[in-house]
Amino acid sequence: MSKPKLSVVVTRRLPEAVETRLTELFNVALRADDTPMTRAELSEAIKTADVLVPTLTDDIDSALIGQAGDRLKLIANYGAGVDHIDVATARQRGILVSNTPGVLTDDTADMTMALLLAVLRRIPEGLSVMQNDTWEGWAPTALLGGRVGGRRLGILGMGRIGQAVARRAAAFGMQVHYHNRRRLRPETEEELEATYWESLDQMVARMDVISVNCPATPSTFHLMNARRLKLMKPEAVIVNTSRGEVIDENALTRMLRANEIAGAGLDVYEHGTQVNPRLRELSNVVLLPHMGSATREGRLEMGEKVIINIKTFDDGHRPPDQVVP
Ligand code: DGY
């Protein structure tokens, strides 16, 4: 007799091919529309499912995990970041957590470079000239940005994505520097031509561009706080494609308004969709709606990872992308 299919609750609409494959393999409850689940719906899901597939828009905190039924054995996150999941509480309850690392590295690194280029070369300002039909022709001093090549890039967080940014930046002729909890192996540093800074303060004070690529954890919360932002050179810019909580958004906004920092390119915000309205008013910032991993290919590969994690677990093994607190 074949064993019963796992009951899997998916909290958001996923690409069609991913939903189809999930439905073939498991007993899946899919959303009718693409809205995040309410707290009540999450609470119901966590009580009845064997496996929950959340995304970063779901707050899977300790109170919610505390309501999990005996059935829930795996939280297979559709995404790499797990800062919205209380992994330690899940572990205490014997619930495994997995994520989808690796498949969104290049896409997020591409978006980091896109933001960096957009801020330094004033692309949104050029776009608005064309969209508003106010172009008066080429002029020697119009819309001058900063040259990318030769600039010093300080990468904060040298994991997979940070390293992918380093490779791209080097190809643009940038000088790559980094700060990370752990120093890279000498051969990796050499391959990336990246200079390590043990002191984040010292790195921040000397860079032309800071790129935030570290995950959100209690120890990275407001790593770029007001004091550290003030160490940046006035002509420097900051880019963030990681998590908004790493930068004190109010302090950054104040400094951008006062021209104490030259610009910012942000894909993520401290309070999710509640973006500081004053940021939106500034011409020296480029704001995107968390699009770092938003490629058709990447989102399919994230789905494939979720499926492999669930299937491997169903076959009695540890999911390959198990997250350990
Ligand atoms: C993730 O997977 O954590 C990314 O932020 C999604 O873009």
Image (spheres, rainbow, N blue to C red):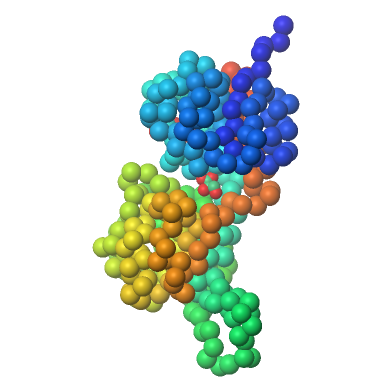
Residue 275: quarter of image: bottom left
Residue depicted at x 59% and y 48%: 104
Residue 311 percent coordinates (x, y): 64, 25
Q: Is residue 31 above or below residue 66?
A: below
Residue 120 left/right relative to 225: right
For the question of whether residue 35 can be seen, the reply is yes
Residue depicted at x 70% and y 28%: 23
Q: Is residue 96 above or below residue 101?
A: above
Residue 92 left/right relative to 110: left
Residue 5 left/right relative to 78: right
Q: Is residue 241 above or below residue 234?
A: above
Q: How many numbered marks appear?
A: 0
* Residue farthest along the top direction in this orientation: 1
Of residues 58 and 316, which is closer to you in this image?
Answer: 58
Residue depicted at x 62% and y 86%: 135
Of residues 53 and 293, which is closer to you in this image?
Answer: 53
For the question of whether residue 96 can be seen, the reply is no
Residue 134 left/right relative to 282: right
Residue 49 percent coordinates (x, y): 55, 22
Image quadrant in which the C terminus is located: top left
Residue 164: quarter of image: bottom right
Residue 12 percent coordinates (x, y): 59, 38
Residue 279 percent coordinates (x, y): 42, 66
Image quadrant in which the N terminus is located: top right
